[in-house]
Amino acid sequence: MKLQTWIHSGAEIAASAKQALQQLLQQAGVEVLPQRADLRFGVCLFQHIDDNLLEDLRLLSQQASVLALCLQQDSLSPAQMWTVLQTGAADVWCWSGMPRDAAPIRARMQRWCAVQQLAESDTVQSQLVGQSCAWRQLLHSLVEVAAFTQAPVLVTGETGTGKELVARLIHQLDPRPDKGELVILDCSTISRELSGSEFFGHERGAYTGAQGARDGAFALADGGVLFLDEIGELPLPLQAQLLRVIQEHKYKRLGSNHWQHTEFRLVCATNRDLEAEVAKGNFRADLFYRIAAWRCRTPSLRERKEDILPLAHHFLSQLDRRASNFEFDPAVRQFLQSRDYPGNVRELRQLVSRIWYRHTGGSPITIGDVPIEERAQYQAPDNMWPHAGFMQAVRQAVDMGIGLKEISQAAADVAMQVGLEQEGGNLQRAAKRLGVTDRALQMRKANRRQVC
């Protein structure tokens, strides 16, 4: 795996220190390049934390995974280290002088590279669509837990945010060469009378109507992944039985005296607050800590509005390959982005389907394709520009003494970033939306990467 990086150093860092780090990295097999454009990883070398450093890190971290490396062991307090991390750094490390080798840096970059490659693979991108910050963070977390651990995963989030898709992705990325099947069990649909059979299976004659032996979820998931959807609905007696199977990896079929062994990876999902349920006595605390070794939350569509149009295009291509290059006219784009989605991504998918079924062919998809019942409920947002929020942001910048050139540059950078996010990273469509040429947007993007 070829690793390349750049080194950004604060003004207080001597050239000799930067050169020494470069030699250590090269000896560890990490190539150091002078240009930051298109590189995924970087090192920010500093001695003291200040506003300039934090701003540098914020900008650098938008382009790459950055290791913030402080050369003064005692110069950063734990609170300051958290501040650096929250600014966007991928990791924060304090050295007391130069070490003997840079192998730990290489190890970090190898993991970041592997996670990045998987997150950008067709396997992931074809299933979990989105480029928003919240969504990218979720993808990286999922890839890391799925491909590099066998930890149980608890997926939380509102209805319709893609929790089952997350479970399917974890199963797909599971590196076991002989892995078994993905077994899905919806705990909210299991009747109390048949719950034991669903999980444990049964022997012939175990209960009235059991005319033949049957494998349950524990047997079917052996060697694979067991996904328990809506685990918060599981009754307390069954929670205790599930906990025992997780701990001992053994179970008995109903009506059997023989123990059977099972090894499965457990993925659970819920839209409930399980910690609150534990406090109320509705969910076992010991089971909660067993299933929540790794936790991730699928963000609602309210938190990732910039993903609405890429998702809509994705759903169109699933409905009809011919529609993959179809555009939405401005009024439809505004409608899709400003509408509320209580059902989240699932509701967006249904809406796009209904729009497509009304569409008569050709691009663009126009406002007349929006279902009539949707029009009655929709109120177009105020199109006055500039909005009060923008005016307030500019007013604050002027009060801080920031000049017109810097304000204009910041506004253009934000517009470029939003345009690319809304068009799923497609440079040509983003340029068209922003009213500039592809080359102009590409040059501005490249220039932004050269910041600092």
Image (spheres, helix red, strand yellow):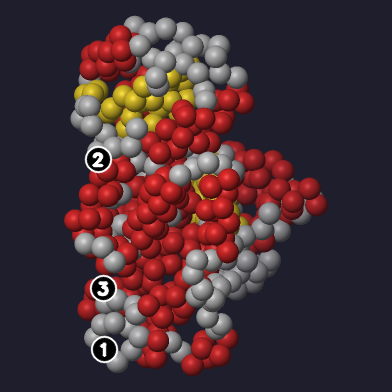
The answer to which of marks 3 and 2 sits earlier in the sequence is 2
In front of the other: 211 or 324: 324
Residue wearing tag 2: 38
Disc 2 secondary structure class: loop
Residue type beneath disc 2: Asp
* Residue for badge 1: 361
Alpha carbon of mark 3 to alpha carbon of mark 1: how far?
13 Å
Q: Nearer the viewer, residue 43 or 280?
A: 43
Answer above or below: position of 370 versus 323.
Answer: below
Q: Say which quarter of the image contains residue 382.
A: bottom right
Quick one: SS at disc 3? helix
Q: Residue 210's spot in the image, x, y percent?
A: 57, 69
Name of the residue lying farthest toward the right: 280
Please say whether residue 407 is visible from this viewpoint: yes
Mark 2 Cα-neighbour bin, 10 Å: few <14, some 14–19, many ≥20: few
Q: Residues within 10 Å of mark 1 (few under 14, many from 20)?
A: few
Q: Which residue is mark 3?
A: 324
The disc, 1 or 2, on the residue closer to the chain's N-terminal end is: 2
**Relative to the observer, which residue lies in front, 330 or 359?**
330
Q: Nearer the viewer, mark 1 or mark 2?
A: 2
Q: Quadrant of the N terminus?
A: top left
The residue under the point 27% across, 43% down is: 447
Provide residue 157's location: percent of width, then percent of height: 58, 58
Q: Is residue 166 above or below residue 177?
A: below
Label 3 vs 1, first from the N-terminus: 3
Q: Secondary structure at mark 1?
A: loop
Q: CA distance from mark 1 to mark 2?
A: 39 Å
* Residue located 53% across and 47% down the image: 397
Which residue is located at x 47 percent, y 29 percent?
52
Q: Are marks 1 and 2 in contact (CB under 8 Å)?
A: no
Task: Find out whether the residues at labels 3 and 1 contact each other: C-beta distance under 8 Å.
Answer: no
